[in-house]
Image (cartoon, grey):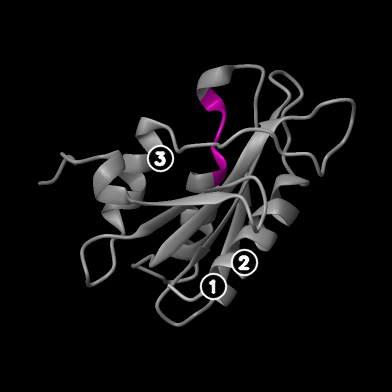
Amino acid sequence: MKQTVIELLINEAIKARKMAYAPYSGYLVGTALVVPSGKIYTGCNVENASFGLTCCAERTAIFKAVSAGQRHVDAIAITGGKVEDGDMDNITDFAYPCGACRQVLSEFLPESCDMDVIVARSTTDYKILRLSELIPYTFDL
């Protein structure tokens, strides 16, 4: 993946994180994913007092892409963590997708049958993993 695409996805994920609604946990997550056409979709986590009704940032972005007709995701960038002292720009954690998000991501693999998952604190501090590393045995019908 090109460095410029990585940086763009991370920057978009950081912007999306600022839109997160997390009054209960204070753990804000933003994501940005790219589809084969090059279009980027973003998402943030949206909490609910009934935690089971909370939607993760990754699934928000996937559902936005799917509702726009997309069926494959090439890569996703994820930024997240607790806000320290009200500083939205200070991301101290690497935020990895939960198991449910990993399974949902596996539903929309690109033609190559794997995707890059970028976990980032900034455009210079990030890790790139393959989805197959995060969920080696997906549920498939």
Q: Secondary structure at mark 1?
A: helix
Find the distance from the CA under tag 2 to the CA under tag 3.
22 Å
- Any part of residue 45 in sight: no
Q: Which residues are magenta?
A: 53-57
The image's mark for residue 3 is: 1
Q: Are marks 1 and 3 in contact (CB under 8 Å)?
A: no
Q: Is residue 56 magenta?
A: yes
Is 61 left or right of 46, judged from the image as shown? left
Residue type, mark 2 in image: Glu
Q: Is residue 3 left or right of residue 48?
A: left
Contact, mark 2 vs mark 3 (Cβ under 8 Å): no
Label 2, secondary structure: give it. helix
Mark 2 or mark 3: which comes first in sequence? Answer: 2
Left or right for 133, reference 78: left
**Residue at figure coordinates x 34%, y 67% from the top left:** 72
Q: CA distance from mark 1 to mark 3?
A: 25 Å
Q: Residue at x 72, y 18 (%)?
A: 24
